[in-house]
Image (cartoon, rainbow, N blue to C red):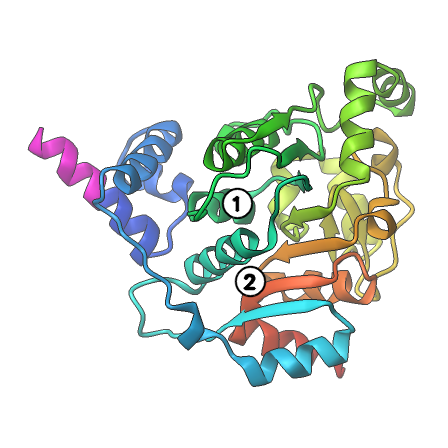
Amino acid sequence: MNSDIELMAEVARLYYEMDMTQQEISERLFTSRSRVSRLIKQAREEGIVEITIHSNHQRKKSLEEVFVSQFKLKDVCIVETKKDSSVSPFQQVTAMAAEYLNTFLRNGMVLGLSWGNSIYHTILHLRPRVNLPDLHIVQMLGSIEGDTPEIDGPDLVRQAAEVYKCRFNYLMAPMIVEDEHVRNHLRQRSSIAEVIRTAEFADVLCTGIGTISSWQSYITPDINRTLMKVHAAGRICGFYFNDKGELLDLPIHDQIIGVGTGVFKTVPNRIAVASGDEKVGAILGALRGSYINALVTDSDTALAVMKLSRK
């Protein structure tokens, strides 16, 4: 029993204090990635890990005002980066994102969720003060069908719905299919079409902002070479854009089962959770393309985005 607790504590320390990925931890401790994921979740549930974010003291209000003005955003939450903190900036940002969602969401709203590590950790931090039984959470993209089910769409909408005690809908399809013909055929299924239609007219969209490297395990080498050739800067809801925010004309966009680009006009509140040096170019592209109108990030990342925008 003690050995189980010690392993759980070690996994939690590597994950939260050393900011290692689940894959890195599994390799270091010679165990499976799925076991690492279970131990991290169990550590939170059993109180071995407790993260407290005092957001009122950590937000950079002056920087937020400048950021909103420069990028014409509805809102921004910028957590002050504290390198001497035992909690990594990423964990502070996702905790802030959870707090932001808790104050934003209301009964009767439809929340569309993307997938990924940022959204997964945001959901882990959700601590709503009240249940929202009339909230409706929908999956915006098909399943990535990878070896990380904890960050995939189905798990995320289910976990978020459990937190708010509300209803939810899976998008029962893979995210990427062979070609446009297969994509169109699947989209005609009533169950799939209904979920996509609901997601495209959601009240709130919550997503991460991806980089080229973060999606390499889900695409073919040929597609990856194409992305490098056209200088893709990032992706959001499966769509790739360049550093100017321009949507790229790529065949892969016709192979994705999920919401269309219309969500960037029909969804009134488009919240992105993103931080880190590797995300700076992708965040700037997403801002320039007006794919999002609210952002949760940290002060180092925000300053780097502003610096890059002046080049």
Give me the residue at 72% from left, 28% from top.
Answer: 175
Horizontal and vertical percent position of residue 311: 76, 82
Task: Indicate which disc residue 117 carries.
Answer: 1
Is the N terminus in the top left, top right, bottom left or bottom right quadrant? top left
Horizontal and vertical percent position of residue 7: 19, 37
Task: Judge the density around disc 2: few (<14), some (14-19), many (≥20) Cα neighbours within 10 Å.
Answer: many
- Asked if disc 1 and disc 2 are in contact, CB closer than 8 Å, the reply is no
Residue 219 seen anywhere in this rendered image of the structure: yes
Give me the residue at 90% from left, 25% from top.
Answer: 180
Give me the residue at 56% from left, 52% from top.
Answer: 101
Q: Amino acid at mark 1?
A: Asn
Question: Is residue 289 in the magenta section?
Answer: no
Number of marks in the image?
2
The residue that label 2 is drawn on is: 275
Q: Earlier in the sequence, mark 1 or mark 2?
A: 1
* Segment colored magenta: 1-9
Q: Nearer the viewer, residue 37 or 295?
A: 295
Q: Nearer the viewer, residue 233 or 166?
A: 166
Task: Judge the density around disc 1: few (<14), some (14-19), many (≥20) Cα neighbours within 10 Å.
Answer: many
Question: Is residue 8 in the magenta section?
Answer: yes
